[in-house]
Amino acid sequence: MLGGLIERLLAPAPARLGPPDAAQALAVLLVRLARADGAYEAAEVARIDRVLGLRLGLGAPAAAALRAEAEAAEATAPDTVRFTRALKEAVPYEERAALIEALWSVALADGERAADEDRLMRMIAPLLGVADRDSALARQRAAAAIAKGA
């Protein structure tokens, strides 16, 4: 399933992604971010499943299956820029700001603010066209939600 997405992203002139492909691109970005610090922890896996379930309206088994596919694809997936470009074109700004919050929730899920995850988020936010201020506010919202156990 994700193999088709990767082929489309590697095309010389990739077509605009539809909702299923955008969901897959998001799943790969979430996994890539969680793995950025070299420690892919259970809290991050659970947060990815939660994000996919809430954002895409998936039940727990479907969210876990999409995450598992993203885990398999992430290691061989093209650079992060292709995924963010595809999401930027497929998702309106307001929703992209919400994607940044979801990504921050994964980065902060393990209770640590790792430098590698911070670096990747500083790259992803502008590539998605999300302003620094909006990314900072999204990080604060994600941290507050995690602190409340949400």
Image (cartoon, rainbow, N blue to C red):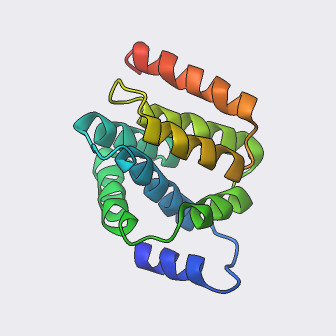
Q: Quadrant of the N terminus?
A: bottom left
What residue do we see at 27% from left, 43% from top?
Answer: 39
- Hey, which residue is sitting farthest left in the picture? 42
Residue 119 x/y as whole percent = 53, 42
What residue do we see at 62% from left, 37% from top?
Answer: 98
Residue 3 x/y as whole percent = 42, 78
User: Is any atom of residue 128 visible in this view?
Assistant: no
What residue do we see at 45% from left, 55% from top?
Answer: 27
Left or right of 128: which side holds 22? left
Q: Quadrant of the C terminus?
A: top left
Residue 112, placed above or below residue 122: above
What residue do we see at 71% from left, 47% from top?
Answer: 126
User: Is any atom of residue 130 visible in this view?
Assistant: yes
Residue 8 x/y as whole percent = 57, 80
- Hey, which residue is sitting farthest bottom in the picture? 12
Residue 141 x/y as whole percent = 57, 21
Total labels drawn: 0
- Hey, which residue is sitting farthest top in the picture? 148
